[in-house]
Amino acid sequence: MARDKKLIIGNWKMNLNVHESSLYVHKLAQIVKVHRDVEVVLAPTLLALQTLSLQVNYRQFKLAAQNFYWRDHGAFTGEVSATQLHGIVQYGLVGHSERRHVFGESDKDTRSKVQAALRNNIRPILCIGETTSERTMNETNDVLHDQLVGGLANVTSEELESVIIAYEPVWAIGTGNNATAQDVATAVLAIRSQLKHLYGARAAEKVSVIYGGSVTADSAADYLALPDIDGLLIGGASLDANAFNTIVEKAFKRSKVHK
Ligand code: PEP
């Protein structure tokens, strides 16, 4: 099936303060064109989300939370819930490798966050991927399976249509170690076949699967050319306006090619 709508997500991580974020969005707004078949999503610091939600043209950019807590309200000092983010963001990252490996988030946490996002009308971007040692030990498919099953438990096949799966091998994130297009194609195939097993062929075909890990303006086209890929999650390169715009334009070209 032709997958013609592309999703490009910029994860700014813990960079740029509120003022800098606003200036950067202003700069992006001047160069990134609106394309019907490309959805561009920005994930700035949580602090800037409110300001940017008033600044962006939603036809041009959607917003994503980099993280949130899974309870809706209550005595959870310092946390921000999906309920509080409702109306400000359209997407939320869940289980990013830095959350899993720096902050020790488990599959149980990701499952609760996927549920919290869905019940608050926020599309969860469930990030999954193996570490270097898991890859060396040939455990990639097992890791992808466990993180998918762990994160998606309780998600119905109807809800699955709102979920985005991001294949983000830990060894490729922020390292400059590019996964080859073949690596990505193999992993995405494994993800779709596991989803088929869990939800059936139709649901597995429909779900959006994107790739992230040291993607640059130069390497983006190789991944976007894969027939089974719906977009990219960009960290470092999303902080360079020209590089990010080039990636959006490459996604646009790819979306047209598949029409
Ligand atoms: C990310 O933050 O999800 C990511 C893929 O980062 P980078 O592009 O810098 O590897």
Image (spheres, rainbow, N blue to C red):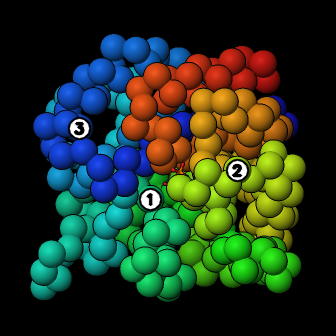
Mark 1 and mark 2 lie on one chain; the one further toward the N terminus is 1
Quadrant for the N terminus, please: top right
- Say left or right for 24 vs 139: left
**Residue designated by label 2:** 178
Inspect the image, locate mark 1, and give the three-letter code of the amino acid beneath it. Answer: Leu
Q: Position of residue 215 (x, y in %)?
A: 61, 42
- Say left or right for 13 vs 242: left
**Residue designated by label 1:** 93
The nearer-to-camera label among 3 and 2 is: 2
Q: Residue at x 34, y 75 (%)?
A: 70
Mark 1 and mark 3 lie on one chain; the one further toward the N terminus is 3
Q: Residues within 10 Å of mark 2 (few under 14, many from 20)?
A: some
Task: Give the quarter of the image for residue 230.
Answer: top right
Ligand 1 within 8 Å, label 1 CB: yes
Q: Specify the label residue 21 is tagged with.
A: 3
Depth check, front residue: 145 or 137: 137
Q: Residues within 10 Å of mark 1 (few under 14, many from 20)?
A: many
Inspect the image, locate mark 2, and give the three-letter code of the amino acid beneath it. Answer: Asn
Give the secondary structure at mark 1. strand
Q: Position of residue 232 (x, y in %)?
A: 60, 42
Q: Position of residue 136 (x, y in %)?
A: 81, 77
- Say left or right for 236 vs 62: right
